[in-house]
Amino acid sequence: MRYPQGVENGSHPRLKKLDRAHTVCGDRLVETTPAVNREVAESAMLLSQGARRAIEMMREADNGNADLAAPAPAGTETHPA
Amino acid sequence: MAFFGVLLPDDRMRQLEGVAPEAIHRELAAVCAAFNRRSEDLGASADRGALDYTRAAAALYSGILRVHPFVDGNHRVSFVALSAALWSFGLPNVRFIGAEEMIAHDDAVVPALVSAPGDVEPFAQLLAKRIESAGTGPT
């Protein structure tokens, strides 16, 4: 890909100047950091499953974390699968 | 789906079902060339809004998804291309996270993938709306 004519170093004169790469997170504009890029990459991975399936996966992951956090009931034995 | 032939090491020809690698390369090149043409046109025009730029970025994003050139990772590659396209216009990238944003993304991208010409307008509008609501639209 090439920068279009009139755009130098990623800034177009008609747009507000952004000296550094930014990302829209929710309704806020944040400077793009490795952590932000990681979030974007993770969301892309989830979205590749389709949004609805991705939401299911997030809920399953949240439930899994909750299960891990909760102590096992007294007298419960665990066996490896 | 089409049939195409590959030459085996012993010089025999084997017929495979699917999209020929040459066709994938050709279609992907066409998507990138279209983006470059639109970029040149946008650069030459003086009065443009965020939507004009997001139309070009959305077409690149959905074009890669439609061609689907890789066995795995097509969506991730498309997101990298989308980020690069938006940044090349001096616009911010857009993150889609959480149920509401993800569903909005899918609802907007699907028309670009299922219709024959690829209707990128809903996704372009979603990108422009997100960018402008974050206060980064054209001055």
Image (cartoon, coloured by chain):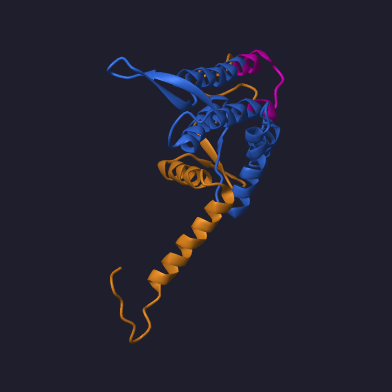
Provide residue A30's location: percent of width, then percent of height.
53, 42
Quadrant the N terminus of chain B occupies: top right
Residue B125 rendering spot, x and y as whole percentages: 69, 35
What range of the chain is rendered magenta?
B38-53
Q: In the shown orientation, is residue B112 left or right of residue A34? A: right
Residue A52 image position (x, y, % from top left) = 58, 52
Q: Which of the pair B42/B118 is nearer the observer? A: B118
Label the blue chain with its letter: B
Residue B100 on the magenta span: no
B19 with respect to B129 (left or right): left
Please give the name of the residue rendered at 45% of the width and 41% of the height, measured from the top-left corner.
A37
- Residue B28: image location, x then y, percent: 51, 22
Picture layout, residue B41 above or below residue B64: above
| Residue sticking out furthest to the bottom | A75
Query: Is residue B44 in view?
Result: yes
A69 w.r.t. B99: above or below = below
Quarter of the image containing the C terminus of chain B?
top right
Q: Main secondary structure of the magenta part?
A: helix
Q: How many marks?
A: 0
| Residue B52 is one of the magenta-drawn residues | yes
Colour displayed for chain A in the image of the structure: orange
Image height of B91 relative to A52, above or below: above
Left or right of A48 on screen, residue A38: left
Q: Give me the residue at 38% from left, 83% from top.
A: A73
Q: Nearer the viewer, residue B88 or A13?
A: B88
Left or right of B54, for residue A20:
left
User: Which residue is painted at 42% across and 66% down in the image?
Assistant: A65
Determine if residue B139 is in view.
no
